[in-house]
Amino acid sequence: MKRRHFLKAAALGSALCAKPIWMAQGDSVEKMNFVFILADDLGWRDLGCYGSDFYETPHLDRLAREGMRFTQAYAACPVCSPTRVSIMTGKYPARLATTDWFGAPQPDTVHNHRGTRHKPLLPAPYEEQMPLDEVTIAEALLGENYRTFFAGKWHLGGEGHYPEDHGFEINKGGHHLGSPRSYFAPYQNPKLEDGPDGEYLPERLARECADFIDDVNDDPFLLFFSFYLPHTPLRAREDLIAKYEAKARQVRHDGPEFLPEGEREARQVQNHAVYAAMIEAMDTAVGTVLDALDRQGLAGNTAVIFMSDNGGLSTSEGSPTSNVPLRAGKGWLYEGGVRVPMIVKWPDVVAPGSECDHPVTSTDFYPTMLEMAGLRQRPDQHCDGVSFAPLLRGESLPDNRPLFWHYPHYGNQGGSPGAAIRLGPWKLIAFFEDNRVELYNLDEDIGEQNNLASTIPEKRDELLAMLREWQRDAGARFPTPNPNAES
């Protein structure tokens, strides 16, 4: 597909493969290892290093002290499967029509879905599996003699589309479901042998990761640790729940615990004990993996990447976390749904304890990891990604690159079909139900409360035109009128 000029300019950085400064000269170059840790539904403010004073995350806080903390990192979608596809492929979900979580209602099944069957629009049809003809980042590294290991949540397709079908040699726990049947053994997981009754899933998956690190020897590797946590069902160890119930009794909040958000209410304070216990369990599991790297002497040659697949759940299903000062959460195109925590440690390259406020998105990991590894770029594959390796080296990238979202579905959390673009400080959201357009200056209004669409029409029209051009370029699918809509 022919690329538009403004997208060509944005992608120029990913077409160049600069030699990483850590690489030695000569024939005996030691390849960079990768540990990619992906949280599920973790909010932007759910870590201590991102401002939470309720959740306790010492291991991830340590990772931030040793690496770079990104303050404006984005998931490619406000729900999980599309973002996960974008990480694996380097492409926006709209380009592959993988725009909703796999298992969500299709237009011909929405009549069975109580929450949306009478909405004004039928959701756009979407593909429910990551295409097998996409060359994933795992396959790219496997082709360069990397060992590849996956543990945890997959949710990118059923039988024939599992991690082992997309470049991972070992798969511990990844299958078609997006949430565990049980967080405690027996797990009822076809890709994970049961441990003793009562074993906690994140602890088990962390041990599987650590065992892989212990056995990998001198081979370069990609370890992808994909948490089910802190996705619902909200389940945690009783001792941790008791700890945070006691802590929650000490929380003081001047305002209301919830405020209206559309037809829902959004949590405004972090005080949910079970969710906090899940966060601590996740952090402890990260510590298990980091300790294994240290124990095997691999920490100095292993890049560690941490991110969440979408924003925190704040408007439904128990509304366990608050993303304030961001608006809304998972399932919404507001910042609370798409801005996420992200930390990257690149030994001997990233300045420890550094911070980056340049906007990046989940399509960017693919070209970045190739550049970090000193491997050739694959611009036809990761065509929507731009390597942010220069940022990791303390350099800069052009600030005129647009970021896009296209979510033509009703979210379970209350969000409605729409699309969005961010360019510099500006963010525009176009809603499909009523063609409403909202425009925000995020530098001045991170909470997206002051809609400037009517007061700065020239910026509104500029961004809307760019968004529509990108949608045409990507072949984006759109919702259609619902003949059963309630008037």
Image (spheres, grey):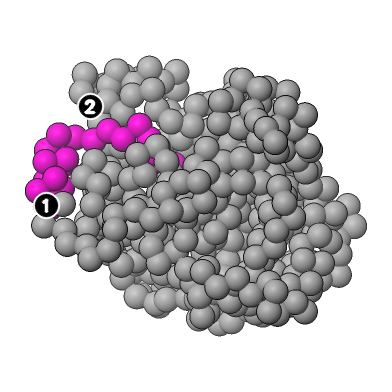
Q: Tell me, yes or no, whether the highlighted magenta stretch contains residue 242.
A: yes
Q: Nearer the viewer, residue 363 or 97?
A: 97
> What kind of element bears circle 2?
loop
Kind of residue indicated by mark 1: Arg
Q: Nearer the viewer, residue 469 or 5?
A: 469
Number of labelled discs? 2
Q: Which mark is residue 249?
A: 1
Residue at x-position 59% and y-position 81% = 396
Relative side of 189 to 241, left or right: right
Q: Tell me, yes or no, whether the highlighted magenta stretch contains residue 263.
A: no
What residue is disc 2 on? Answer: 199
Give the percent coordinates (x, y) of residue 484: 72, 27
Dot placed on the residue nearer the N-terminal end, 1 or 2: 2
Give the position of the C terminus as an image quadrant: top right
Give the percent coordinates (x, y) of residue 75: 55, 55
Q: CA distance from mark 1 to mark 2?
A: 29 Å
**Label 1 packing within 10 angstroms: few (<14), some (14-19), many (20+):** few
Q: Is residue 271 above or below residue 232?
A: below
> What kind of element bears circle 1?
loop
Residue at x-position 47% and y-position 61% = 327
Residue at x-position 11% and y-position 41% = 242
Q: Nearer the viewer, residue 384 or 442?
A: 442
Which residues lie in the magenta part? 219-247
Mark 1 against mark 2, which lies toward the viewer?
1
Residue at x-position 44% and y-position 64% = 326
Q: Is residue 219 visible?
A: no
Kind of residue indicated by mark 2: Glu
